[in-house]
Amino acid sequence: MVIGKIVGTVVTTISHPHYKNRRLLVVQPLALPGQPEDGDFIALDNSQAGIGDTVLVNREGNGARQVLANPDAAVISVIVGIIDSVTLA
């Protein structure tokens, strides 16, 4: 699982059948101070997230396919929730 911020959308003219009627969003992973930052990645939206939202992303293929209830889906990353707030103790 990765916490990230939605920074953009992806528009395609042709897409894989498993992506039909689903949005592709660009996610910027959030890191704690001192941790190396990962690069942005694309995730399939399963929670109606939008640009600027902080989200929880499942970045493991089998887990992502389980969320979509499709064991054959060609997907690695899926947004599973929108985060309201994060508190570090």
Image (cartoon, helix red, strand yellow):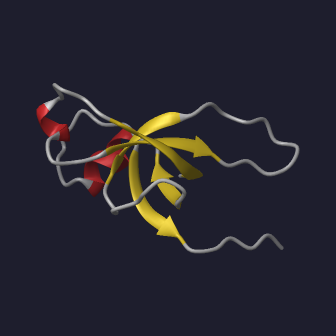
- Image coords of residue 11 (percent x, y): 29, 34
Can you say whether 48 is above or below 38 in the image? below
* Residue 72 visible here: no
Which residue is painted at 40% across and 54% down in the image? 79
Can you say whether 62 is above or below 1 in the image? above
Considering every residue shown, the one lying at the far top of the view is 14
- Image coords of residue 22 (percent x, y): 22, 48
Residue 67, picture quadrant: bottom left
**In which quadrant will I find the C terminus?**
bottom right
* Residue 48 visible here: yes
- Image coords of residue 73 (percent x, y): 20, 38
Which residue is painted at 36% across and 49% down in the image? 63
Residue 47, picture quadrant: bottom left
Which residue is painted at 24% across and 32% down in the image? 74
Can you say whether 3 is above or below 44 in the image? below
Horizontal side, residue 77 vs residue 55: left or right: left
> Closest to the observer: 86 or 48?
48
Horizontal side, residue 12 vs residue 32: left or right: left
Residue 38, picture quadrant: top right
Horizontal side, residue 4 vs residue 20: left or right: right
